[in-house]
């Protein structure tokens, strides 16, 4: 009996723990290794191991701040950057615990998490740089980004965050006060004034399929621009992508006599994709899709497509050329023109996918033209032409910007008709469809003559070098002759200034009563009939020499393409002889949404770049 007691005491004193292996599936082991503060709100195996090594597991539960100080002393007395990784994750876990019950404390710990992650990644005094294949390196980047996102979300509401007299923002942390100053990099002057900065991570985008991001360090932001009444090309909800990066003036183990300071550097990711941090070239994280969705989610865009059809006069102030980003003299403008009963919102998928291509984003700037679609398309084309001429006079009056004069137009449906009229010479052909007299002989006021002149007489715009026609009814659409189209045409209110000009001037000059215009003739719906005088006249006009044009044609019918249709426009109407390329999309009239159509437009834009390079060289 005595021997058994002695053996039991020896076993207890030795703390004998049996060692065993338990077989698990590979995915289970992987999930266990990937557990961390961000994905599971529990510390990673790496950080748990650090606490066990230094007997700090219980202390962290009781006093997180003292645990941070203890780990920092150890990390700095014997340089060990991986202890700083653990400090970053522990700070993040502490902040998550405080976020709801004590936001001010949470803010301090989120900033500490970002700071220690920053030190782990970049502090040259801690020995060799971290291995980029080490999971701690990737998680360190995520801890920095997530911590900064949480911190920026809390700063406005934090009572401890205040602007001191000399400008910086002062925030109290467990390691003392932190002073933050803001600097901007790469933004054009027109985009340098923001009314607010929104976290892109706060929004979920719907209605756009693909999300385009670049991965690196920093927080993607939506920079909402101050409205500039003097800029007619600024959309109502102008916003631009931005990336925020917090740089700390002192890292974990040096300069403790200095106050803790940081700069919040705001970068324009359209112009800057990377920055240097303590000698390391560091890519910046960015989000191109969410700021675009912010612009296109304007409820007015959805409303305008119906107002523009039935009550065009109400859209007079909203008609115009709009830029998604400030004008850049180094980038080629691509102008998107929507079709009937539509708005710029229709281009959301294509705009997003094209801007998601780094080459296109670097070389092109994307604009759109908004107009009321109930008006005669020849009148809308006159307004579009005036808008492009005004843009030329505003941004490139001396033709000093070669990129401007390489403009590309992309028009869908009726928008293609408007675009085509930018590269045609009307001569007297269009005017002859409504009058036997010259314009000067008509009994019209100078104001009416100017409207008529811009509508019926035009020359090709030299700045437009390429046009992409998508589902364009060059020879009209037979749907316009259906009874329902006649009903819709009756519901469209023709603006008084157009009706007055037409009936008081044009109809007086037509000898044959049957050739006179009716009010229904002055609607876009009836303008699209294959028998319409305007459709026939513009279809007969050639496209100017030197302009390259392409056709994208939807087809929902199997078999012979020549007998195909997109459900609204027949192939024979969309086809144009002389096109550089013709691409058949297996889709209906809204074929510009189709991925293959978007890929084809991307190909055309790259072809345009290559042809310009060839000529330029």
Image (cartoon, rainbow, N blue to C red):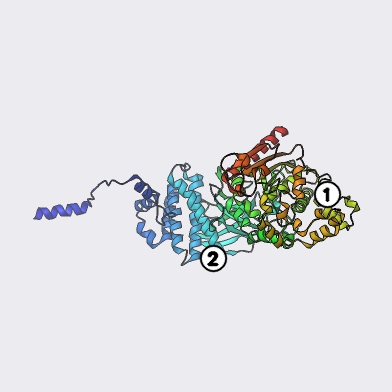
Q: Which residue is mark 2?
A: 158
Q: Is residue 226 visible?
A: no
Residue 431 shows which numbered tag?
1
**Measuring 80% from the left and 43% from the top, which residue is drawn there?**
425
Q: Is residue 488 visible?
A: yes
Give the crowd class for mark 1: few <14, some 14-19, many >=20 residues within 10 Å: many
Would you identify the image quadrant in which residue 227 lies? bottom right
* Apparent side of residue 440 relative to residue 408 in the rendered image (left or right): right
Would you identify the image quadrant in which residue 290 lies? bottom right
298 relative to 565, above or below = below
Nearest to the observer: residue 545 or residue 246: 545
- Position in image of residue 371 (x %, y %): 71, 55
Nearest to the observer: residue 492 or residue 385: 492
- Position in image of residue 268 (x %, y %): 63, 50
**Measuring 63% from the left and 53% from the top, which residue is drawn there?**
346
Residue that sits furthest to the right in the current view = 441
Residue that sits furthest to the left in the current view = 1
3D distance between C-alphas at marks 1 and 2? 67 Å
- Position in image of residue 64 (x %, y %): 42, 60
On the rendered image, what quadrant is the N terminus found in?
A: bottom left
Could you tell me which secondary element the residue under label 1 belongs to? helix
- Position in image of residue 253 (x %, y %): 49, 50
Q: Earlier in the sequence, mark 1 or mark 2?
A: 2
* Apparent side of residue 413 relative to residue 96 in the rendered image (left or right): right
* Apparent side of residue 18 relative to residue 244 in the rendered image (left or right): left
């Amino acid at each position: 009996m005595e021997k058994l007691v002695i053996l039991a005491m020896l076993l207890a004193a030795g703390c004998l723990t049996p060692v065993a292996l338990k077989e698990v599936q590979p995915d289970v082991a992987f999930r266990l290794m990937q557990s961390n503060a961000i994905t599971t709100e529990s510390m990673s195996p790496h950080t748990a191991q650090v606490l066990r090594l230094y007997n700090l597991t219980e202390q962290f539960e009781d006093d997180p701040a003292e645990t941070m100080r203890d780990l920092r002393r150890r990390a700095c007395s014997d340089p060990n950057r991986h202890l700083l990784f653990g400090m970053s994750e522990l700070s993040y876990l502490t902040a998550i615990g405080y976020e709801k019950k004590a936001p001010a404390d949470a803010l301090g710990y989120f900033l500490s998490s970002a700071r220690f992650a920053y030190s782990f990644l970049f502090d040259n005094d801690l020995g060799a740089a971290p291995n980029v294949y080490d999971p701690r390196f990737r998680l360190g980047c995520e801890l920095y980004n997530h911590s900064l996102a949480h911190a920026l979300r809390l700063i406005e509401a934090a009572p401890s965050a205040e602007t001191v007299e000399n400008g910086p923002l002062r925030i109290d942390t467990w390691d003392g006060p932190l002073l933050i100053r803001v600097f901007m990099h790469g933004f054009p002057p027109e985009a340098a004034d923001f009314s607010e900065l929104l976290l892109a991570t706060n929004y979920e985008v719907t209605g756009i399929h693909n999300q385009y991001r670049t991965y690196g360090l920093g927080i993607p932001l939506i920079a909402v621009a101050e409205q500039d009444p003097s800029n007619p090309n600024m959309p109502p909800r102008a916003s631009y992508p931005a990336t925020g990066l917090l740089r700390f003036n002192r890292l974990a183990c040096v300069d403790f006599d200095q106050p803790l300071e940081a700069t919040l550097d705001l970068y324009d990711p359209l112009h800057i994709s990377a920055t240097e941090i303590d000698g390391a070239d560091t890519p910046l994280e960015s989000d191109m899709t969410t700021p675009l969705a912010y612009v296109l989610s304007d409820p007015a865009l959805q409303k305008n497509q119906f107002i523009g059809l039935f009550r065009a006069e109400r859209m007079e102030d909203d008609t115009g050329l709009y830029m998604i980003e400030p004008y850049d003299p180094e980038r080629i403008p691509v102008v998107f023109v929507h079709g009937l009963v539509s708005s710029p919102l229709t281009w959301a998928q294509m705009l997003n996918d094209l801007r998601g291509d780094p080459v296109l984003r670097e070389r092109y700037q994307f604009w759109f033209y908004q107009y009321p679609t109930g008006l005669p398309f020849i009148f809308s084309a006159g307004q579009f032409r005036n808008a492009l001429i005004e843009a030329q006079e505003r941004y490139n009056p001396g033709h000093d910007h070669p990129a401007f004069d390489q403009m590309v137009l992309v028009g869908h449906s009726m928008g293609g008709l408007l675009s085509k009229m930018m590269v045609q010479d009307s001569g007297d052909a269009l005017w002859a469809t409504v009058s036997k007299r010259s314009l000067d002989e008509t009994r019209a006021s100078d104001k009416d003559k100017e409207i008529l002149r811009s509508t019926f007489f035009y020359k090709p715009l030299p700045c437009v070098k390429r046009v992409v026609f998508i589902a364009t009814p060059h020879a009209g659409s037979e749907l316009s002759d259906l009874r329902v189209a006649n009903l819709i045409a009756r519901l469209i209110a023709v603006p008084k200034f157009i009706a007055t000009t037409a009936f008081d001037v044009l109809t007086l000059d037509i000898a044959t009563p049957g050739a006179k215009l009716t009010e229904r003739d002055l609607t876009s719906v009836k303008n699209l009939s294959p028998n319409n005088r305007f459709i026939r006249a513009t279809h007969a006009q050639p496209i100017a020499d030197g302009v390259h044009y392409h056709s994208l044609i939807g087809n929902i019918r199997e078999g012979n393409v020549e007998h195909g249709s997109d459900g609204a426009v027949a192939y024979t109407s969309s086809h144009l002889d002389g096109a550089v390329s013709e691409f058949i999309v297996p889709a209906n009239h809204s074929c510009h949404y189709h991925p293959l159509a978007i890929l084809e437009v991307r190909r055309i834009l790259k072809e345009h770049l290559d042809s310009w390079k060839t000529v330029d060289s």
